[in-house]
Amino acid sequence: MKRVTIRVPATTANLGPGFDAFGCALSLYTDVTFEETEWGLEITGCDEAFTGPDNLAYVSYCAVLASMNEEVRGLKIHIDAQIPICRGLGSSAALLVAGAMGANVLRGNKLSTQGLLNITNAMEGHPDNLAPAFYGGLTASMVDNGLPVTVNFPLHPDWEFLALIPDFTLSTEKARAALPNEYSRADAVYNIAHGALVLKALELGDEKLLRTAMQDRIHQNYRKKLIPDYEKIEGLVRTTGAAFCLSGAGPTLLCITQDERLEEKLAKKLQLNSWFFRTESLLILLRLQEGRFYNFCFAAVDFMQCRKILPHTKASSYALCACVTFIPKRSAIIA
């Protein structure tokens, strides 16, 4: 039987003012393996709640086959996910992209990448995470007459993306429910102008311009109320000189900088303020109620395992968070 593994990058959406439009691929990946069988559906590697036919990878897989008028046979799916779910890093989009690409590869690559984007966008509803997952790098997207239109933008090679990933989730549905139904003309003009400058700042590598441009009046002011300690952490990050925004709908917080020492600087500030962090070297520093430190190494962001080891922690809701440096380049690939 045919078998293929698809590797899909995490993605960050919005980048401040680019609500539902801007996205960037990050170097944290989910691998999904598809193997055709005679009959049945078997999904492994994820929580039991996601092992049924409503799994997004399977839904996307079936949608692509339906568009080809191809029969859905038996299928085994194994998910090896490093992208944490409901954290604003495109975990849902990653599964949709994996399912679409898996089906396309197994049936002879009959559809173009744009065709796959069209199908998955019909399910997701907005292409801001899907587009960079398919195409890689920095993208701006819109939907015209029901179909997504995407353009890649240049990204200066010196940028580093640092994500603060908390130990709590925030569903996209809840984050969208916090938004108003209408906006003023002034807020619309503000975001259009700032969004244009964000793209140029990312192209030029202009840190000062990016800090100024990465402001928003459409979603962040409303969503930050759902994220404990948002303003405290924003204040700490801004003292380092990095640009700062929500990643997608949150609750992950994103820092963009060219300072190679940002991790070190931010780690010290987080320690001093009793926040825990995880560096790219996979070291997690955990402060217990007694004030002692324990070090643990993990192959991926594994919050469930952390909770089993340390079920009772002190400090803020960000008491168990990840701090990961990303390289925003690669698109989804056949692994």
Image (cartoon, grey):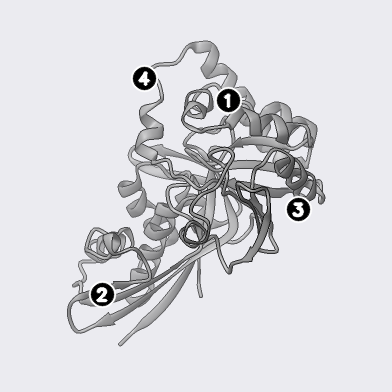
Amino acid residing under circle 4: Asn
Front label number (4 vs 3) = 4
| Residue at the far bottom in the pictured view | 1
Residue at 44% x, 75% y is 5
* Pointer 2 with pointer 4, Cβ within 8 A: no
- Across and down, in percent, residue 12 comes to 55, 46
Marks 4 and 1, how far apart at CA: 16 Å
Height in image: 206 above or below 139? above
Disc number at residue 42? 2
| Residue at the far front in the pictured view | 290
* Pointer 4 with pointer 3, Cβ within 8 A: no
Q: Earlier in the sequence, mark 1 or mark 3?
A: 3
Amino acid residing under circle 3: Pro
- Across and down, in percent, residue 14 comes to 54, 37
Of 294 and 206, nearer the camera is 294
Amino acid residing under circle 1: Asp
Amino acid residing under circle 2: Glu
Height in image: 59 above or below 7? above
Height in image: 14 above or below 123? above
Q: Would you name the residue on which mark 3 appears?
A: 157
Front label number (2 vs 1) = 2
